[in-house]
Image: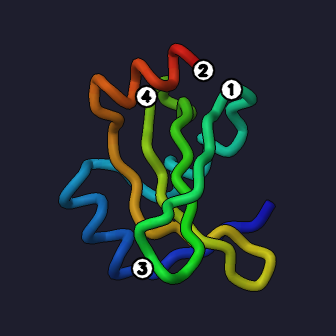
Amino acid sequence: MAYQWDRDKAAANLRKHGVDFADAVTVFSDDLAITITDERFDKERFITIGIDAFSRVLVVVYTWRNDEIRLISARKATRYEQKQYEDG
């Protein structure tokens, strides 16, 4: 799977949430990750909750562009989101 993101957006995300997009993409290797469609936007977006390579439960928002996953944001999951992940 290929990934892409805007460099400025990635830097802003790292400052705001403390999560590097390069680390966040590892949630897509989590077999137990949960993915839902984000219906709040006109363009198709997805939200995946999964564990990254550092054992953090992350929430990753992304879209598909040219057969690649384009990251929009990534952050640590809230307690509620962690419970959603744990409950499957």
At a point 60% along the width and 20% down the height, the residue shown is: 88
Q: Which mark is residue 19?
A: none
- Image coords of residue 70 (percent x, y): 59, 72
- For mark 1, give the secondary structure: loop
When the figure is inspected, residue 68 is found, relative to residue 25, above or below; the finding is below
Q: CA distance from mark 1 to mark 3?
A: 28 Å
At a point 58% along the width and 57% down the height, the residue shown is: 37
When the figure is inspected, residue 78 is found, relative to residue 67, above or below; the finding is above
- Image coords of residue 10 (percent x, y): 38, 70
- Image coords of residue 49 (percent x, y): 52, 38
Q: Which mark is residue 7?
A: 3
- For mark 4, give the secondary structure: loop
Q: CA distance from mark 4 to mark 2?
A: 16 Å
Q: Which residue is mark 2?
A: 88
The local crowd at label 3, few if under 14, some if 14 to 19, many if 20 or more residues have their Cα within 10 Å, is few
At a point 52% along the width and 52% down the height, the residue shown is: 47
Of the numbered discs 3 and 2, the one sitting upstream in the chain is: 3
The local crowd at label 2, few if under 14, some if 14 to 19, many if 20 or more residues have their Cα within 10 Å, is few
At label 3, which amino acid type do we have? Arg
Which mark is nearer the camera, 4 or 2?
2
Of the numbered discs 4 and 2, the one sitting upstream in the chain is: 4
Of the numbered discs 1 and 4, the one sitting upstream in the chain is: 1
Q: Which residue is mark 1?
A: 32
Q: Which residue is mark 4?
A: 56
Which mark is nearer the camera, 2 or 1?
2
At label 1, which amino acid type do we have? Leu
Instruction: Confirm or deny contact between disc 1 and disc 4 (CB under 8 A).
Output: no
